[in-house]
Image (tube, rainbow, N blue to C red):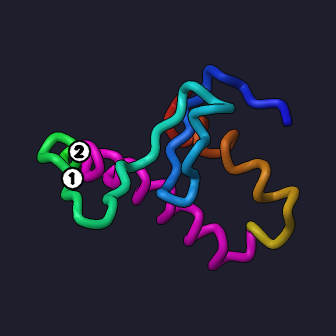
Amino acid sequence: MLINHQIEIIGDKGYQGINKIHKNSQIPFKKFPKKELTQAQKKSNKQLGKKRVIVENVIGKLKIFKILSSSASIRAIPVLLLKLRGS
């Protein structure tokens, strides 16, 4: 799988281990049993969530209008988001 390492990947907790294949990626800190997150980790998760919610909302809108009806459309999401961001 070819991954452009200049693109920042923001994932959810399901992407544990993404840092091994893509160094420019961020995922939220995961809480382990009987161990609380630090205030810094909570703050980081909140900031990451603010970024992710924008992307999730865009994907939701695209699904409503049936723009993302095929896997080819889904692969175009990173390009679309870069254009929305102005890059």
Relative image position of residue 78 (x, y in whole percent): 66, 43
Amino acid under disc 2: Gln
Residue at the limit of the structure toward the left, as seen here: 39
- The Cα–Cα distance between marks 1 and 2, rounded to whole angstroms, is 6 Å
Residue located farthest toward the front when viewing the structure as drawn: 34
Chief secondary structure of the magenta span? helix
Residue 62 shown in magenta:
yes
Circles 1, 2 touching at the beta carbon (< 8 Å): yes
The residue singled out by tag 1 in the image is: 37
Residue nearest the observer in this picture, 25 or 62: 25
**Which stretch did the figure color magenta?**
44-67
Q: Is residue 86 left or right of residue 33?
A: right
Residue identified by numbered label 2: 41
Q: Quadrant of residue 69?
A: bottom right
Q: Please tell me which residue is depicted at 38% across the width and 48% down the height of the picture.
A: 51
The residue at the point 43 percent across, 53 percent down is 52
In the drawing, does residue 79 fall left or right of residue 8? right
Give the class, few, some or many, for how many residues have Cα within 10 Å of label 1's Cα (few <14, many ≥20). few
x, y percent for residue 59: 59, 64
Quadrant of the drawing holding the N terminus: top right
- Mark 1 lies on a secondary structure that is loop
Residue that appears at 74% across and 68% down: 67
Give the left or right position of residue 49, taking residue 17 as reference.
left
**Quick one: label 2, few (<14), some, or many (20+) residues within 10 Å?**
some
Task: Indicate whether residue 65 is drawn in magenta.
Answer: yes
Please state, as top left, top right, bottom left or bottom right, where the C terminus lies in the image: top right
Q: Between 43 and 19, which is closer to the camera in this rendering?
A: 19
- The vertical placement of 63 against 11, above or below, is below
Report helix, strand or loop for mark 2. Answer: helix
Residue type of the residue flagged with mark 1: Leu
Please name whichever residue, 78 or 65, is drawn nearer the observer in this view of the structure.
Answer: 78
Q: Outermost residue toward the top? A: 6
